[in-house]
Amino acid sequence: MTGLRSRTHAARLLAAASLIVAGLLACACRRESEVKTAPVIATALPSLPAGWERVYEDRIELHLPADPVAVSREELLRWVDEAARSVEAYYGKLPTVPLRVELLRSSGHGVDGGDTTVRGDRAWIRVYVGANADARDLRRDWVLTHEMVHTAMAGLPSAHHWFEEGLATYVEPIARARAGLESAEDVWKQLVEGLPQGLPTPGDRGLDRTHTWGRTYWGGALFCLLADVEIRERTQNDFGLEDALRAIADDGMTILTDATIEQVLARGDKAVGVPVLSELYARHALQGVDVDLDALWKRLGISMSRRRVSFDNDAPLAKIRREITRAAR
């Protein structure tokens, strides 16, 4: 399991580039400038350190493995592009720009983990690529998308690490489905198989005080699923968890800042018009709350036999299930 991240305290806003626009205010903050008038005279982007290049329309600063790997440069670039598209499909944009992605070689096959930190004014993702990884390994990978999702949430106190990791665990497969890289069946299969690991066990003291692996990753993901379903129920499917998360990121509560969980949840609740996040947190933070997952799957119209998922489109919450994993519009 990846996604364990460290953070450094860094200046939040530093100028990265200058745009001279007649009659228009130029902005060198975390969000991209929108140029609405012409003519535009732009200065050149600042140079990058040796070995770095700009990709994804200059929004990602990328460093490929310094040591040779079996997978081609083209496949590595496609992998980065697909992860970024997935996050954009869910959040509407990359939460922090420019985003720095450093790929490092490790031994063996596949993708071997990663972490997300802040260095200076950049969110900085490092992911380890196996020396013998191939294109199929990259197509199946979830690690890079998981790490990119981390950039969309403010740094929270350590007691709330479950929210940061659970959020990335929940959003990652859905984001990939929105981008057309994962099927709805695969997303729900992962959740049906994984979420039982997030249920409280005897002696559980709530998400804020029970810091096991299962409760941190899958307990946090379960919190997100419950929030997503309840927001949609209470708003007649007009809003979902992504609307709350987009508002949080749009307000600048990304990895480049620190915030309290109360601030984050309150902003999300305001965006969807119902206090679901704050109410769920009050119930789950300091005590273990059992969740009847079988009943939830039945209401969503999800069943699994021999590790194959099937859907019941007549189930009470079938429309909510379909909306959660819909393709990006």
Image: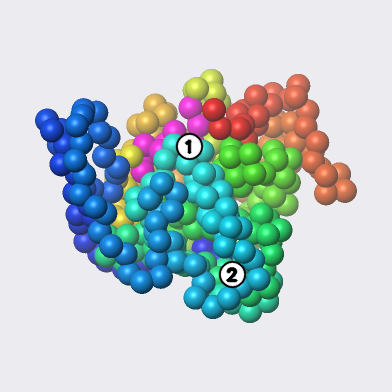
158 sits to left or right of 194: left
Which tag is nearer the camera, tag 1 or tag 2? 2
Residue 243 versus residue 161: which sits nearer the camera? Answer: 243
153 sits to left or right of 111: left
Q: How is the image coloured?
A: rainbow
Amino acid type assigned to the residue bearing label 1 in the image: Glu
Residue occupying image coordinates x 26% and y 54%: 45
Tag shown at residue 177: none
User: Which secondary structure lies at badge 2?
Assistant: strand
Residue 23 lies, with reference to residue 64, above or below; the image says above
Question: What crowding class fits label 2: few (fewer than 14 Cα within 10 Å), some (14-19), or many (20 or more)?
Answer: many
Residue 149 versus residue 89: which sits nearer the camera? Answer: 89
What percent of the width, then of the height, locates residue 270?
35, 31
Range covered by the magenta-colored residues:
239-249
How far is mark 1 from mark 2, CA to CA?
A: 30 Å
The residue that disc 2 covers is 129
What percent of the width, then of the height, locates residue 133?
67, 68
Residue occupying image coordinates x 51% and y 38%: 89
User: Which secondary structure lies at badge 1?
Assistant: helix
Residue 260 lies, with reference to residue 50, above or below; the image says above
Residue occupying image coordinates x 57% and y 62%: 73
Residue occupying image coordinates x 28% and y 62%: 47
Main SS, magenta residues: helix
Q: Quarter of the image containing the N terminus?
A: bottom right
The residue that disc 1 covers is 242
